[in-house]
Amino acid sequence: MKCTLVGSRYFGAMVFDALRKDGVEIVRVVAPEADDRLAQAGRAAGVPVSILENPKLVPAGDVPEGTDLIVAAHTHARVSNEALAHSRLGGIGYHPSLLPRHRGIAAVEWTLLEGDPIAGGSVYHLADGWDAGAIAAQDWCFVLKGETARELWERALAPMGLRLLTQVVRQAARDGVLPAQAQDARFATKAPMIRRQVSLTEARSPLTSVVVTAIGADRPGIVSQLAERAREFSANWAGSRMANLAGQFAGIVQFEVAAENAEALVTALRGLEFSGLRVAATKCEAKPAPPGARMVKLELAGPDRPGIVSDLSRNLAARGVSIEDLHTEIVGNGQASGHVFKVRALLAVPDAISSAALQHDLEALAAEMVVDIALGEQSANA
């Protein structure tokens, strides 16, 4: 059996080793980058390596004539129909879900977000449509309580994929055909990429918090009045709690404003008493950073799941970052999959940790926790 292996990273390299140990001849490796782990494994073994010019497409020229089967192992590139035509048996790939459930790039993450009690893996025929080809082999496993996407992948789904791919290639070599069972599209769900964003921005001047409480007869426009006052002084609406109690409006709002504008904002907010509100506004100086550290604002939002704060605090503590202030809330539509968990925190970050290093660490954490993260850096004397 002669195979062209399209893939990347740890899983691609593991499949490369497993197939070769099983007597399969790998005639070419196709990888996204020259320093990818699979590309390195191919070169070390003396196997020809092709690097994709377009990271989203495998062209016919990357599949040598005489290929019996194309095997895809952790690739985000679509194998073109012309490339499949160069292979006697076409191609197969491994997808870490029980297809047709969770078709898409983030199958493991969506398995956890949807609260699936079981997960699985599928070897499927490469064809038009993402992850929509006929099933060649499939297996399942239980999901452990509190397990992360990475833990589920490493514990069960990656070893499962290695076994299933080897099994199908061995069967194809023996029988000369690939097993095939059509997917039932009625049960298809999508697992699109989950957007993650980490940004570090340095504040031009120290920020001061202004906390205002407002009580008065409820009427349209109260919130608008508060927002207009904040806008006049370039203040940020950082958080609020509002309610209508027995016809009375009651609200608490936290604004963040440049230190030089804080006193003027307090005066302007107190001026709202002439509109019939009882207003109290207090200026709270920003907390200074400990010696050898700087203050960084963290904003985190993502699908709710148990353990987010625990995971966040543990990861930050491991890097020597302390949480000086923390606010959390859950918003949603009453459905488990619709709940969004939001965190706002003030962090004391050691000066020895650069902004680039902190951003890299938090990007990895965001990927693990399936959340969006935004960071805003305050000046050292905030």
Image (cartoon, rainbow, N blue to C red):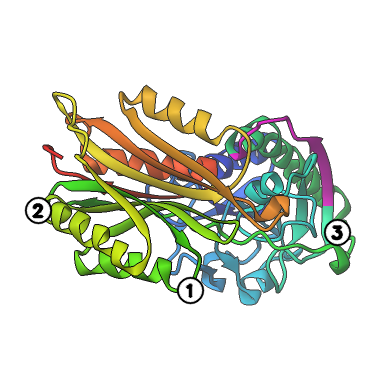
Q: Position of residue 118 (x, y in %)?
A: 80, 40
Q: Residues within 10 Å of mark 1 (few under 14, many from 20)?
A: few
Q: Position of residue 231 (x, y in %)?
A: 26, 68
Which label sits in the foreground, 3 or 2?
A: 2
Q: Position of residue 272 (x, y in %)?
A: 29, 64
Dot 2 lies on which element?
helix
Q: Which mark is residue 177?
A: 3
Mark with earlier residue (3, 1): 3
For the record, the magenta segment spans: 137-149
Is residue 215 visible in the rendered image? The answer is yes
Which label sits in the foreground, 2 or 1?
A: 1
Q: What residue type is disc 2 on?
A: Glu
Mark with earlier residue (3, 2): 3
Dot 3 lies on which element?
loop
Residue bearing mark 2:
260
**Total residue callouts:** 3
Q: Which mark is residue 220?
A: 1
Q: CA distance from mark 3 to mark 2?
A: 75 Å
Which residue is located at x 25 percent, y 57 percent? 270
